[in-house]
Image: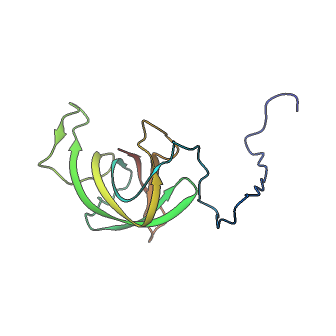
Amino acid sequence: MNGPVDKAFRQRVTITLEDDIDISRGDMIVKVGNQPKQEQEFDVMICWMSDRPMQVGGKYALKHTSRDARCIIKEVKYKININTLQKMEDDNNIGLNDIGRITIRTTVPMFIDGYRKNRNTGSLILVDEATNNTVGAGMIV
């Protein structure tokens, strides 16, 4: 091809493995020694994007790479004061445009990295299942 490639252009790929391994959408093939962690409970720096405040114990849909799962907000560790960048450990209410560190638990194990290591496997979004609105964008810590 000559010139820039259109980002909308997608190519299907078929991979034939030597061993009989059951893999499907959402599974990863990674370089030896560079495997992501497999976790069901992990911390996330979240930016809340909904008028409805985050609910500790609330259930949300989670989208991570090409995988979908459900999760529950286990804990708010702290909120960031966006004017001073100080941690506010005494205010655990996360509302519109707030940033905080939370712990989530997923219904299935997720292959994750910290955002600093790999922004693709270190980021996620949370979706309100009732409205299908994106309510949070997060970086895995």
Residue situated in front as seen by the camera: 138 or 19? 19
Q: Residue at x 76, y 48 (%)?
A: 10
Residue furthest toward the bottom? Answer: 130
Which colour scheme appears in the figure? rainbow
132 vs 48: above or below: below
Q: Quadrant of the C terminus?
A: top left
Pinpoint residue 36: horizontal percent, then vertical percent: 47, 48
1 vs 96: above or below: above
Q: Residue at x 77, y 53 (%)?
A: 13
Within the image, what quadrant is residue 8 found in? top right
Q: Quadrant of the N terminus?
A: top right
Residue furthest toward the front? Answer: 19
Within the image, what quadrant is residue 40 found in? bottom left
Task: Please state if 50 lies on the left or on the right of 64 as rendered.
Answer: left
Q: Residue at x 88, y 28 (%)?
A: 2
Task: Please state if 85 lies on the left or on the right of 61 as rendered.
Answer: left
Residue furthest toward the left? Answer: 90
Residue situated in front as seen by the camera: 49 or 58? 58
Task: Please state if 117 lies on the left or on the right of 85 as rendered.
Answer: right
Pinpoint residue 64: horizontal percent, then vertical percent: 50, 55
Task: Please state if 26 lies on the left or on the right of 122 as rendered.
Answer: right
Pinpoint residue 113: horizontal percent, then vertical percent: 44, 46
Pinpoint residue 119: horizontal percent, then vertical percent: 49, 40
Q: How many marks?
A: 0
Residue situated in front as seen by the camera: 35 or 53? 35
130 vs 127: above or below: below
Q: Residue at x 45, y 45 (%)?
A: 122
Residue furthest toward the right? Answer: 1
